[in-house]
Structure formats: structure tokens, C-alpha cells
Amino acid sequence: MKIGWAYMGISALLVIVGTFMAIDGIDPYGDLLLASSLLFIYLGSNALADDRKAREAAEADTE
């Protein structure tokens, strides 16, 4: 579960830095950071969902 939150934290930093770079006029790099943050959002949300499914399956087995 911690890896999912790590991916989400990295994506948040990329969004913040990419937004500042895009506003300052460094468009290609700011846009690239914003686009790459989508990858980290995808990876993080999938990791969190997989951990939740595994936790729910383990709880169902104990009942």
C-alpha cells in the first residue's frame, strides 16, 4: 500500500512543479511534467486498488 501512496505523492509534486513551469513560460518541460504525472497517477491508483482487493480477500478468508 505504501508504494501506491508514494506514486501519488510523486504525481502531486510533478503537477505542482509542472504547473509552475508552464506558468513561467517553460512550456515544453512544464507540459511534459504534467503529462508524466498522469502515468504516476495511474500507477498509484492501480497499486492502491490492488492492495485494497488483497486486503478485502484476506478479510473474507478469515470470516
Image (cartoon, helix red, strand yellow):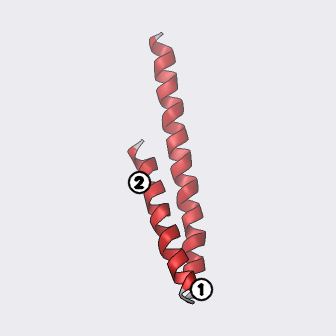
Label 2: which residue?
A: 6
Q: From mark 2 to mark 1, how far is it between C-alphas?
A: 25 Å
Residue 46 position within the rendered picture, expressed as x and y whole percent measured from the top left = 56, 46
- State the residue at coordinates (57%, 61%): 39
Q: Nearer the viewer, residue 54 or 16?
A: 16
Residue 24 position within the rendered picture, expressed as x and y whole percent measured from the top left = 53, 87
- Residue 59 left/right relative to 34: left
Residue 27 position within the rendered picture, expressed as x and y whole percent measured from the top left = 60, 86
Residue 17 position within the rendered picture, expressed as x and y whole percent measured from the top left = 47, 74
Q: Is the residue 4 above or below the residue 19 in the image?
A: above
Q: Nearer the viewer, residue 59 or 34?
A: 34
Which SS class for mark 2? helix
- Residue 55 left/right relative to 39: left
- State the residue at coordinates (43%, 58%): 9
- State the residue at coordinates (54%, 53%): 43
Q: Which mark is residue 60?
A: none
Looking at numbered disc 2 in the image, what kind of residue is underneath it? Ala
Looking at numbered disc 1 in the image, what kind of residue is underneath it? Pro
Which SS class for mark 1? helix
Q: How many marks?
A: 2
Mark 2 vs 1, N-terminal side = 2
Q: Is the residue 1 above or below the residue 32 in the image?
A: above
Q: Nearer the viewer, residue 9 or 20?
A: 20
**Quadrant of the image containing the N terminus:** top left
As drawn, which residue projects farthest toward the left? 2
Q: How many residues crowd mark 1 within 10 Å: few (<14), some (14–19), many (20+)?
A: few
Q: Is the residue 24 above or below the residue 61 in the image?
A: below
- State the residue at coordinates (45%, 66%): 13
Label 1: which residue?
A: 28
Q: Is the residue 20 above or below the residue 56 in the image?
A: below
Q: How many residues crowd mark 2 within 10 Å: few (<14), some (14–19), many (20+)?
A: some
